[in-house]
Image (cartoon, rainbow, N blue to C red):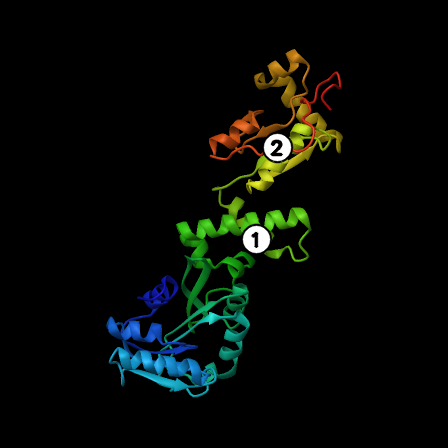
Amino acid sequence: MISKRLFQIANMIPKDMIVADIGTDHAFLPVYLMENGLAKKVYACDNKEGPLSGAIAHIEEANLTGSVIPILSDGLTDVPKDTEVITISGMGSELILEILNAHLSGFENIQRIIVQGNTSVQKLRQYISEHNYRIVDECVVEEYKYYQIISFDLTPAERPLEAEEVWLGPVNIRKRSETFEKYLHERYNYLYKLNLEHPLKDQREFLVLKKVLTGYGERKMLTIYGSAMCPDCVACKRNFDFYGIEYHFIDINLKLHDLADFLSLRDKLPVFDHCKEIGDIGLPALVKEDGEVFLNWEGYLREKGYEVLPEEGEIKAACSLDRKGC
């Protein structure tokens, strides 16, 4: 039984090809390919004798001697040139790029290259784009963490990759698989919280994620009218930040036109009637992407299945025109 990650790599390999698995470790992928009739022959390659010994033992145990051929090779250096598919996975993207840059030009029969970097996956796509190669398929696999797998060939691409495609992948963006969507949201929420605590020095990935999440009409941000001096607004922001709910906060104390926008809403909408009757300002006021305005942010959280966090410090009343609450 192989891992979910290796299983997905196996599914991306065209059938009946000669495959070279670089950094094969215990030859789990090569053995799986041959046991399931998915390859013509597989080279199990590693640059260390220890892992290669483990691979040899696994190959012999599976009775695949002759079909899975162990090779001690530094990257692609000693890999036979009849190889048609190269797989490189389970290592850093920088090392993968070193391997590809060093010896890929010597292979004339390559039909597909499948890479899975553990770090900085965008660098792999940048390499593919700069060399005018074509991404054929991609996927995101969740197995304790998220892995991005990229399959490409040496066919000239129609155009260079755009920024969001470099970071997230053109096929991933087009397919929008459930796992990819989950990865997008979790990664964005993680960077969003980091950016709140300490502004990120490199904002590129954060901005790309934001663009992809909001630019396709599938997720829009709430707008919150409030004030940094309003205890209920502070509590609302703290809860939304904790649960990773994206929003655009407008502090009505900072700009007159923002204050005017809020007062226009307050004057016109029935949702503020009770606030006006009891002398409350009506903060925070939340505006959904469809324009609906609501004031019960705690109810909004509960509808989404979240518990409102306990109060921090002294509990104060909502902001009111008589200044008793702020």
Helix, strand or loop at label 2? It is helix
User: Is 249 on the left or on the right of 47, as rendered?
Assistant: right
- Residue underneath mark 1: 208
Which residue is pictured at 66% across the width and 33% down the height? 312
Amino acid at pointer 2: Cys
User: Is 243 on the left or on the right of 258, as rendered?
Assistant: left
Task: Residue 304: tell me if it is visible.
Answer: yes
The first of marks 2 and 1 along the sequence is 1
Q: Position of residue 195 (x, y in %)?
A: 65, 49
The answer to whether 30 is drawn above or below residue 217 in the figure is below
Which residue is pictured at 50% across the width and 35% down the height? 306
- Residue underneath mark 2: 236
The answer to whether 135 is drawn above or below residue 69 in the figure is above
Which residue is pictured at 70% across the width and 22% down the height? 319
Q: Position of residue 111 (x, y in %)?
A: 36, 75
Report crowding for label 1: few under 14, some 14 to 19, many 20 or more residues within 10 A (C-alpha): some
Task: Residue 108: tell me if it is visible.
Answer: no
Distance from Cα at disc 2 to Cα at disc 1: 26 Å
Quadrant of the rendering where the C terminus is positioned: top right
Foreground pick, 135 / 199: 199
Q: Position of residue 160 (x, y in %)?
A: 52, 64
Which residue is pictured at 36% across the width and 80% down the height? 55
Helix, strand or loop at label 1? It is helix
Quadrant of the rendering where the N terminus is positioned: bottom left
Amino acid at pointer 1: Val
Q: Position of residue 97 (x, y in %)?
A: 52, 75
2 or 1: mark nearer the eye: 2
